[in-house]
Amino acid sequence: MSYSDFSGIVRISTAAAIVIAADYDRLSELIGSVPPTINLHEWSPAVFNKLFELGFFELLGLTEKVEGRYHDNGKTRTMKLLSGANAAGNEAAAKQLHELSALITEGRGLSDTISFALNSALDEAMINVARHAYPDDHNYQLRHVGKWWVTAEADRVEKKLTIVIYDQGASIPVTLPRKKFADALKDKVTRVIRTAPTHDFSDDSAYIAAAMTEGFTQTGEAFHGYGIPQMKELIDICGCGRLTIFSRGGRCEYEPGSNSGIKRSTYDTSVGGTLIEWVIQLPEEPNA
Amino acid sequence: MLEEVDMIKIATDFSAYPAGRDDNDGPFNGSRFRSDILVPRLKSAIASGRKLVVSLDGVRSFGSSFLEESFGGLVRLGFSKNELTEHLQITATAVGSSRYVEAILRYIARATV
C-alpha cells in the first residue's frame, strides 16, 4: 500500500484539504482502509492543524494518537468535514457554519440576510450533486461514492469566511451539454472561446461560465436553472467576496456586481470533479 | 378582499430547512411540501372563497429549487395564476427575507402548464 507524507508542504488551502480528505473518505468507504501517513513530526503546523480540524485524522483512525500535536493558532479555524448525497445534510451544515462564523462575529453568528443566502446557496450546491454530478452513464476514472463534502474556514483576523463544497462527479463540462438546448449552449460557449484548444480541458471554463448564467442547466427544462445564480447571489448580498467554481479543468471566478465579468481560466489537469468556494468578508455591523 | 382564514408556517408545519424538488434531493423537498400541505390547504381555501397565507418566518434556507417546485409547481398542476393571486399570499417579516417572497411571485409568474 502507498503512504502519504505531507512533510514537504508548508501550507494547505481549505480547498486543497477538502480534495485530499474527500479521497481518503472515498477510499475508506470503498475498501475500508486508507494509505497511512508518515513523518507526522515533520509536518508543518499549518498543514497539521488544518487537517486535524477538518477531521482528516479521524478518517485515518488516528485522532487520539495525534491530538497532542494540535495547537489552536488563534487565527483560523476549520470546520469539521461533513458529507452527504443530497440536501438531507443541509441543517447540520447550516448549524456548523453558524457556530464557525460566531468565532469572527463576537459570538453573534451570521446575520439573517447572509445566513439565508449562504444556506440557500449551499442547498443548491448539494442538490446539484444529487441531481447531476454522478450520472450513471459516465465513464469515471475512479470508483465514486456519490457524495459531496463540505467544510469552511473562519479567519478571525481578517473576518473572512471561506466555504467549500466538493464532489468527485462527472463535472459541469461533461454534464451540462444536453440535446434539448445544445444549440443555445454551443452558441454561448463558442462566443467565449477565442482560441484553438490546447488541451482536453481547454473549453471547460466556458461551460462553467454558461452554467453560471440563469436558465442554463443540465436538464434543459425552462423552470430549472436557478441554482448557480443563487450561489452568485450570496456574493452579491455580502457586497464583497468571491465565488470560484472549479470543474474538471476549468475555473471561473465571480466577484460582486460583475454580471458579465466572470474571470475564466483552464488547466490541463482535473480537480477530480467540481469544487465550489465562496470567500465572504463579514460586515462589521451586527445587523448587516 | 378575501378574509384570511388559514395559515401555513413552513418552518413549523414542514421544516425550517426545506430544500430541493423531490425525494431524490432530500426529505423536506418542494414536491412533498406542495402535495402534502400546500395543495390540500389551497384547494380548501379556493373552495371556501378564502385566502391562504404562507409564512416564511422561521425558515432558515430558501433554495430556489424548493421555492420553484413548491409554488411554480402549483401552476404546472393546473392552478391558474388568477386563482393564486386571489387565494394565496406569501408573507415574511425577517430582515433579508423579502427577496424570497419576490422570488416566489416570480416563479409563479414564469411557470407554465
Image: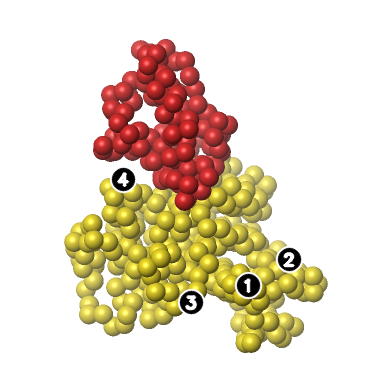
- The amino acid pointed to by label 4 is Phe
Q: Residue at x 26, y 37 (%)?
A: B113
Q: Give the spatial CA distance, label 1 vs label 4.
A: 38 Å
Mark 4 or mark 1, which is nearer the start of the sequence?
1
* Percent coordinates x, y for residue A241 in the rendering: 47, 57
Which chain is assigned yellow? A
* Percent coordinates x, y for residue A85 in the rendering: 52, 58
Q: Could you confirm whether marks 3 and 2 are on the same chain?
A: yes
Callout 2: helix, strand or loop? Answer: loop
Q: Give the spatial CA distance, label 4 vs label 2.
A: 47 Å
Disc sitting over residue A28 in the figure: 1
Q: Residues within 10 Å of mark 4 (few under 14, many from 20)?
A: some
Q: Is residue B109 left or right of residue A21?
A: left
Chain hosting mark 4: A
Chain hosting mark 2: A
Q: Residue at x 24, y 66 (%)?
A: A189
Chain hosting mark 1: A
Look at discs 3 and 2 and give the one toward the viewer. Answer: 3
Disc 3 designates what residue?
A142
Disc 4 designates what residue?
A223
Contact, mark 3 vs mark 1 (Cβ under 8 Å): no
Contact, mark 3 vs mark 2 (Cβ under 8 Å): no
- The amino acid pointed to by label 1 is Ser
Q: Residues within 10 Å of mark 1 (few under 14, many from 20)?
A: some
- Chain B's colour? red
Mark 2 or mark 4, which is nearer the start of the sequence?
2
Q: Nearer the viewer, residue A74 or A208?
A: A208
Q: Give the spatial CA distance, label 4 vs label 3.
A: 33 Å
- The amino acid pointed to by label 3 is Leu
Look at discs 4 and 3 and give the one toward the viewer. Answer: 3
Disc 2 designates what residue?
A72
